[in-house]
Image (cartoon, helix red, strand yellow):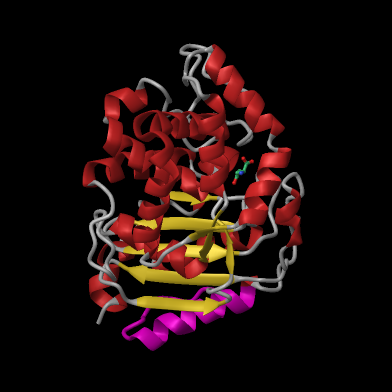
Amino acid sequence: MDNLEITAQKSSDIHHVLQHIYDTVKDNHKGTLPDYIPELAKVDPDKYGLAIVTNKGSIYSVGDVETTFTIQSVSKALNYCIALELLGRDVVIGSVGVEPSGDRFNAIEFDPRTLLPYNPMVNAGAITIAGLIYDHLGDEAYEFILDRFSKAAGRPLQLNEDVYKSELLTGHRNRAIGHLLLSTQAIKEPVDKALDLYFRQCSISVSTLDLAVMGATFANLGQNPITGIQVFDMTSIRNTLSVMFTCGMYDSSGFWAHDVGLPAKSGVGGGILGIVNRQLGIATYSPLLDINGNSVRGIESFRMLSDEFGLHAFDSTNRGSGLVSHFFDH
Ligand code: GLN
C-alpha cells in the first residue's frame, strides 16, 4: 500500500490511513536523543504517536498519543501569538523580525540590518518574546502563559520540574543570547526573568493529543473546538501561522514548506505541531531527532499525511480544501 489514494468516506478509512502511516514509519529508528539538556536524553526513544483533531472537535489518533513530553520550541509559536495579542503587531515586529534565519535554532546570530533576532521561532527571537511578555505582565507572566497553553490543550498542563531544572543548569548558550539581546537593547532588564520564563515555557509537559487540540484551536480561529473557549486572538493567529510556515522547522523550513506545505513548529522534546488552516490540528511525537533538531519520524509522518490527504497548501488536487466537510467530520 505505497500510494494510498484517498477515497475515504468514513472515519474508519481515516483510521486505516493513520494506521498505515504509523506501521510504515515506526520501523524508522534513525536520529538521536538530544543530550545538551541531559533530562531530554532520558526518554524512551521508541515512543511514537500521531493525532489529528478537526476544527469541529473530532479526534483521530494512533500510537502513544497520551505519553507526555516537554513542549520545548513548540511553545515559541504559542507565545508569539500571545505577545502579538498583548502588545500589538508593531511593538512585536519592532523587537523580532520575521525572516527565516537559515541558521541553527540556537545560533548566536542576529539580522545584521536591524541587530534584532531573525524570527520568533529561533531561540534568540523566542527569548526576546519571553522578555516582552515578562515586561508586560511581570511575575504573573508564567501563570498567564500556562493558563493559555492549558486552555488551548483543553486540560490543565504542568511544568516538568526535572526538565526545567536541567535547562536552568545547562542553558549557558541561551543565557549568552539573553545578555547579547540586552546589549543590543532588544530586551530589557531583568534578563534573568525573561530567560526563566523561556526555560519554563519550554518545560511544560504535553501529550501528542494536547498538541493536536492546540493545533485545532489555531485552526479554529483561536477557539478550542472541544471546550468552546476562545483562547487566542484571531488576527494574531494569522501572523503566527505565517511565521510558522516560513520559519517553524528551523533550517529545514524551506524543505518543509516545499514537501509538506503546512505551518508547523517542532521542538527538541520530539513533538511537531502542524495546522491545516480552518480545518485540522495535527501532532506527532517521536523523540529521535535529525541534525536540525526535528523529529525524524515526525517529519516522515507529516510528509505521508500531507501526500495521502492532499494537505499541502498548494496541492494540485486541492483535496485538502474540502477535507473536513467531506470526510473528517461526518
Ligand atoms: N529549550 C530548548 C533550547 O533552548 C528549546 C529548543 C528547541 O526545542 N529547539 O535549546
Residue 4 falls within the magenta-colored stretch: yes
Tell me residue 161's x, y (percent). 62, 55
Q: Residue at x 73, y 66 (%)?
A: 45
The residue shown at (50%, 50%) is 74
- Looking at the picture, tell me which residue is in the foreground, 12 or 141: 141
Q: Is residue 192 magenta?
A: no
Which image quadrant: the C terminus? bottom left
User: Does residue 263 appear left or right of residue 72 in this picture?
Assistant: left
- 263 left or right, relative to 289: left
Q: Is residue 263 left or right of residue 171?
A: left
Q: Quadrant of ligand 1?
A: top right
At x 71%, y 73%, the residue is 27
| Residue found at the far front of this picture | 139
Q: Quadrant of residue 89?
A: top left
Q: Residue 174: x percent and y percent?
A: 63, 32
Q: Position of residue 6 (x, y in %)?
A: 39, 76
Q: Position of residue 12 (x, y in %)?
A: 40, 88
- In the picture, the quarter occupied by the N terminus is bottom right
Residue at screen point 59% across, 57% down: 160
Q: Which residues are magenta?
A: 1-24
Question: Could one spot residue 104 in this view of the protein?
Answer: yes
Can residue 315 be seen at all in this image of the molecule? no
Q: Is residue 292 above or below residue 32?
A: above
Give the answer, above or below, for where 53 lies relative to 70.
below
Counting labels gives 0
User: In the image shown, does 211 or 323 lie closer to the viewer?
Assistant: 211
Q: Is residue 325 above or below residue 189?
A: below
